[in-house]
Image: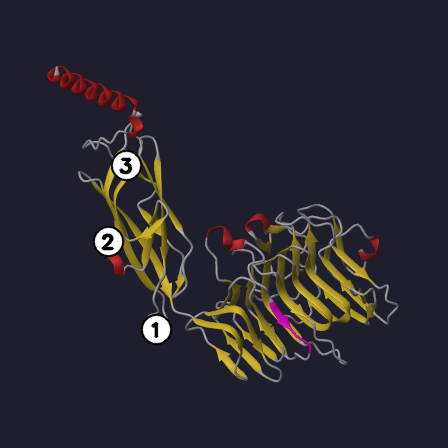
Amino acid sequence: MSNVILRNALLISIVLSLAIWSCTPEQEIIDNSPGDILLLSTDTLLFDTLFTSVGSVTRRLRISNKNRHAIKIANISLEGGPSSPYNIIVNGDKGFSFDDVVIFGGDSLLILVEITIDPRNEDLPFLVKDSISIDQGNFQQYVKLISWGQDANFLKNVILNCNETWTAERPYVIVEGVLVDSLCTLTIEKGVRVLFDNNSSLFVQGSLKVKGDTSDQVIFRSIRSDGIFENTAGQWGGIFFLEGSKSNIIDNAIISNGQFGLRVGTPDEDNIPDVVVSNTVIENMSEAGILAISSDIDARNTLVFNCGSYMIGNFAGGNYNYYHCTFTNDLNDFRRDESSVQFSDNLILADNSILREDLHLEIVNTIIWGNLEDELLISLEGQTNSSLVLQNNIIRSTLADFDTNGNLIGQDLNFPGFVSPFQREYAIDSLSIARNAGIDLGIEFDIRGFARDDRPDIGAFERIDPE
């Protein structure tokens, strides 16, 4: 009797085992056959230049199993081991080595890769390499990890030394805010990169002297420039000139991807420019390129484009000169209902009081363009003693008032004749109506340092035909 019971128990056990095995989906059955190879989304992961002690953007590696059954990876690890500046995240766990990782048939595994680089006290960028080993037991694959590290000068919530000079050996990374104090001067030499963390800004109550040149501009941009961040607006605050600031010079600079390029609030009793801008590009601002209240600005050979609200917004009076500039909002990154170049002698404040000052404005040899029918608006409703000079400009407008003094008014989207707006190239082409249409202002060179002739072109760029 006991033998019968034993045979029956054994039979039941075998049947149950077969039933369980037969119910297991084929894609979950592990079968590491020699010919079963996992596919990698790439053989090399490249990282943008990274600053020491600052974590990187995450890169992604996908391992795909195109076979019908599951494959067990014996080991996924960083070749550099625990001392590697990289780390990997597998199934939500962070580390440098993972054993017995299973990928079901027809499924894939996403591996996240991060890097933090220790400072080396070196001025030049340095190469940081490692690799990920993927060991199937019978087959091994590798993915290279390559990045450049860069030491930087980190500044967080500081008031600068009274007379300080920044040089190009290492970038300057601003976190939260930096202040140039009253009666002090910050000088920034050619080739310097000033990089801003999220919502960080440079505040100037004293003076700022930016001294780039045509081949080595001073760069102001966000700390992120990789991938989608390359032309993304609003990543940092802006350069703010506070009341009392004066004698500011910005020459040969590129200011990118902030909320404001220049925000100027420097009212005073004279008409001497407190901010002089030349040979400079201001691009991809979520709010405004140059926003000023009752201030004094002189800008020449300056390109401003792709701004959310205003390329130029100068309100409540002031003294403004714009010579040989190109202002264009013809990309479609922002939805706008208002003209992107605006001037007024008044400003309604939050308490409904009105700030009024005389507006003295000169715009000569300048392109004002965009994708709205009227891109220039001038309001003189403050009953002030204001004066306007608009001469030899190209303006997108329907207003006949602007069609005087050599101004060219048009609606055709190709009217100025830019080389390639969608590629952000705002030099003029060979057929542009801007050619030889300006007047001689004594500005000998254009934004690139090319010589202007005695019949200069309108805008920041002088057309130079190939020989």
Question: Please, is residue 331 above or below residue 381 in the view?
Answer: above
Residue 138 included in the magenta stretch of the image: no
Q: Residues within 10 Å of mark 2 (few under 14, many from 20)?
A: some
Which residues fall within the magenta stretch?
A: 239-243
Measure the alpha-carbon separation of dots 3 and 2. 19 Å
Q: Which residue is mark 1?
A: 121
Please tell me which of labels 3 and 1 falls first in the chain. 3
As helix, strand or loop, the secondary structure at mark 2 comes to loop
What separation in Å lies between label 3 and label 1 (alpha carbons)?
Answer: 41 Å
Residue at the (58%, 61%) spot, across then down: 258
Check disc 3 and report the residue beneath it.
38
Residue drawn where x is 45% and y is 69% of the image: 171
Percent from the top left, x then y, of residue 120?
33, 70
Q: Secondary structure at mark 1?
A: loop
Residue 69 picture location, percent across and down: 28, 29
Q: CA distance from mark 1 to mark 2?
A: 25 Å
Quarter holding the N terminus is top left
Type of amino acid under label 1: Asn
Q: Is residue 354 above or below residue 18?
A: below
Name which residue type carries label 3.
Leu
Q: What amino acid does circle 2 point to?
A: Glu
